[in-house]
Image: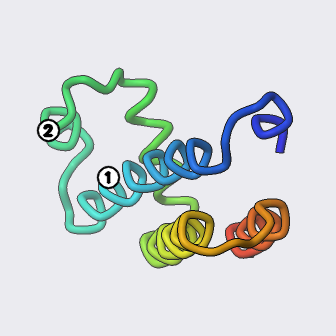
Amino acid sequence: RDLRDQGMASIALLATIRGQLHRALTLASMEAHGLPQAAIAKRYPQMRERQLHKTLQEGRQYGVERLQRALLAIADTELRLKNESVPEEPLMESLLARLSS
């Protein structure tokens, strides 16, 4: 909500959140398939060690299934924002509720 209050468009905000969750899902999936952190780090040399560790921790915390559900909820919200004449605020509030459950 703070970012929206600062003027960030809902679509841009969703893209930012989607990117973060997608990265966490990708890393969590790799780890779930037994890839050690060092091997994951080699596949993502652009990520600093601290960022990689934090993203892996988030992936573990939320879990693969929850991250997948969150990405689907974001995609649904994005489509509705782009294709329907509905107020943004209720859609974004609904998404926040879905993401936090």
| Residue under numbered circle 1 | 27
Kindly indicate whether the residue at mark 1 contacts the one at mark 2 (C-beta within 8 angstroms).
no
| Residue under numbered circle 2 | 43
Direction from residue 92 to residue 55 in the image, left or right: left
Question: Furthest residue to the front?
Answer: 85
The tally of labels here is 2
- The residue lying at 84 percent from left, 69 percent from top is 90
Above or below for 47 versus 68 = above
Whichever of labels 2 and 1 marks the residue nearer the N terminus, that label is 1
Quarter of the image with the N terminus is top right
Above or below for 21 versus 82 = above
Circle 2 crowding by C-alpha within 10 Å: few under 14, some 14–19, many from 20: few
The amino acid marked with disc number 1 is: Leu
Q: CA distance from mark 2 to mark 1?
A: 10 Å
Q: Position of residue 93 (x, y in %)?
A: 82, 65
- The residue lying at 75 percent from left, 62 percent from top is 92
Label 1 residue SS: helix
Q: Position of residue 98 (x, y in %)?
A: 71, 75
- The residue lying at 68 percent from left, 68 percent from top is 99
Quarter of the image with the C terminus is bottom right
User: Tag on residue 66?
Assistant: none
Label 2 residue SS: helix
